[in-house]
Image (cartoon, rainbow, N blue to C red):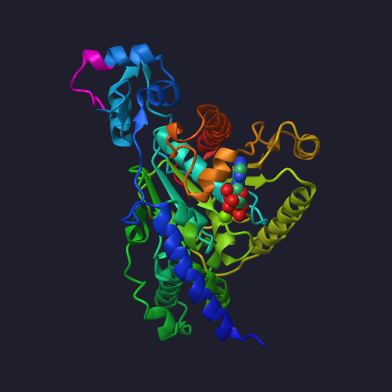
Amino acid sequence: MYTHEDLARLQQQSLKMQGWIRQQTFSPQMEKTLRRFSSWEVGELIFKVNQSTLRGRLAADPSLPQGQVEEDGRQRWYSLQEINELRRRLTVNRRSLMPPRPAGKRAIRAAIANFKGGAGKSTVALHFAHAAALDGYRVLCVDFDPQATLSHSMGITDVAEEYTVWGVMARDLIHETERMNANTQGAETGAALPQRRLPASVTGMGLRDLRVSDFIKPTSWPTIDLLPSCANAAFVEFASAQYRHLNPEWSFFAAVSRYLDAIPDDAYDMIIFDCPPAIGYQSMNAVFAADVLYIPSGPGYWEYDSTTSFIGQLGEALEDLSHFDGIVPAGTLQLPKAFLDVRFLLTRFEANNELHRAMQSAFSKVFGDRLAANPIEMTRAVEQSGRFLSSIYEIDYREMTRETWRRARTSFDQAYEEFRGNLIAAWDKLEADQ
Ligand SMILES: Nc1ncnc2c1ncn2[C@@H]1O[C@H](COP(=O)(O)OP(=O)(O)O)[C@@H](O)[C@H]1O
Ligand SMILES: [Mg+2]
């Protein structure tokens, strides 16, 4: 017979192994670091300008960052900070190298969501974040999944649950309850309404006075920050039900949205959410805060099946929320929730697999232009780099066959470029005061 004590013992054993794997994966200090990028990558893949043009410009102005020469001596290698300085200072054929961003608007928010574990959500979120950062955008990632794949991939471990989406939600409950209490006191209705009280287990966690930035961690990428998750944040799903009971008028699903609204508009360009493989309090917060919904799916029949039930259940959950009648200040919650764009994205796609092609045409028949034109290919490079918790962008191309690296990178680049086009179109539609 096995009880919770046996499970706890098994977990202890497993945690020891986890520490060992982490040590093997990252540098001895267990810190993830970002590599430099070669002049070939900077010219051809990042700026998309002729390499000799770039070399000429760098030679003409010694005050520009000049990178580092490695032992083989042929290439210069640039840090992302240096690449970003070049981007700010260079124009090529009167073209700015800065990525487009609509003026006066907040960051655009995209949720990568689906039911199914293994659909490729975390892989897509990681690669889109890295591609966007190489493209010159400042990115904030929010890990809504207590499995914390994205956090671990970004080198962030040992996170306390107060500093995850769970903490954001509990802090919001405290703030919202205070606001509601202040409103009832101030109301000139005569009889004072009863004050809502939260137990010390909620108010005593020290969350009330945390600042917005206290939840955000820097990563090894200078232009990517992360609001991380951790295994204990799974508890939020239980806690949130209790929280709703404590204050039934609390719009629990809008907690993260309110939190993100408090970030200065120009602090980030893109905010990317990695979602848990379930519909629950955390994923409803993700979906509710998102402007754009990206739904990755594997190209198999069962994955098609589960994607179908995902959109069905998500639709029902959003319809439920649209009847929410708690106390919110006028104009702060727009119900029903409306996305600026919804897309499906095939992942782990093999172009020479007949079943995959058949499923692609089924997806395309059903979802029409909601299906992203560029699927993400199944690649050994990602399988391998996934094992080492790195994206294809982080892997130095000299560590594998150049062709394997290039193919994987091209597949993610194309999917990212389409993603970026969709985000920019959605950004244009976003109201400036939203
Ligand atoms: N394009 C791909 N090619 C090869 N392996 C992939 C690809 N996308 C995802 N994988 C692998 O599939 C597994 C599940 O992917 P993951 O992104 O963690 O899914 P999810 O977040 O939806 O659960 C991981 O081991 C990952 O390395
Ligand atoms: Mg995941």
- Image x and y of residue 422, in percent: 57, 34
Frontmost residue, 333 versus 70: 70
- Image x and y of residue 293, in percent: 60, 46
Frontmost residue, 386 versus 225: 386
- Image x and y of residue 226, in percent: 41, 53
Which residues are the magenta region?
58-67
Displayed quadrant of residue 244: bottom right
- Considering every residue shown, the one lying at the far left of the view is 63
Give above or below for 141 relative to 159.
above
Q: Is residue 164 left or right of residue 336?
A: left
- Image x and y of residue 69, in percent: 26, 26
Frontmost residue, 322 versus 349: 349
Quadrant (top left, top right, bottom left, bottom right) of the N terminus: bottom right
Displayed quadrant of residue 198: bottom left
Residue at image x 30%, y 27%? 88
- Count every numbered label the image shows and give the total: 0
Residue at image x 43%, y 62%? 20
- Find out whether residue 362 is within the magenta segment: no
Give above or below for 110 relative to 20.
above
Displayed quadrant of residue 115: bottom right
